[in-house]
């Protein structure tokens, strides 16, 4: 998932990944959905905690 790492904030992720295709909110977490990034046909899900730091990343092939 390129250079995204646990602990990065939303701004850092947007610089690396670009704009999310969809953003969902569940309780105090935000879930960013990315689909078909350049050079890849994969879909990704990046979860941010209440402090807007990455807490989980998933490849949704």
Image (cartoon, helix red, strand yellow):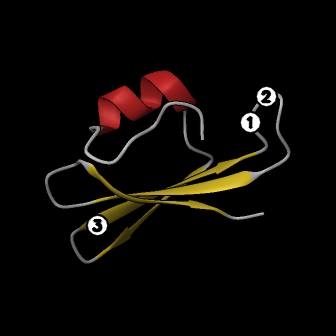
Q: Is residue 21 left or right of residue 47?
A: right
Please name the residue shown 39% across and 41% down the image.
5
Residue 3 visible in image: yes
**In terms of sequence position, does the residue under pointer 2 or pointer 3 come before the other?**
3
Foreground: 45 or 7?
Answer: 7
For the residues labelled 1 and 2, say whether their Cβ atoms are less than 8 Å apart. yes
Q: Which mark is residue 37?
A: 1
Q: Secondary structure at mark 2?
A: loop
**Badge 1 local density, few (<14 within 10 Å), some, or many (20+)?**
some
Q: Which mark is residue 29?
A: 3
Q: Quadrant of residue 20?
A: top right
**Badge 3 local density, few (<14 within 10 Å), some, or many (20+)?**
some
Q: Is residue 8 left or right of residue 5?
A: left
Q: How many marks?
A: 3
Q: CA distance from mark 2 to mark 3?
A: 27 Å
Residue 18 visible in image: no
Which residue has dot 2 on it?
38
**In terms of sequence position, does the residue under pointer 3 or pointer 1 come before the other?**
3
Q: Where is residue 11 shown, x and y percent of the image?
A: 32, 29
Q: Is residue 45 left or right of residue 8?
A: right
Please name the residue shown 41% across and 34% down the image.
13
């Amino acid at each position: 998932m390129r250079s995204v790492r646990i602990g990065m904030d939303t701004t850092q992720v947007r610089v690396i990944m670009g704009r999310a295709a969809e953003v969902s909110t569940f309780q105090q977490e935000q879930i960013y959905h990315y689909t078909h990034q350049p050079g890849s046909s994969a879909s990704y899900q990046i979860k941010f905690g209440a402090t807007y730091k990455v807490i989980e990343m998933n490849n949704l092939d």
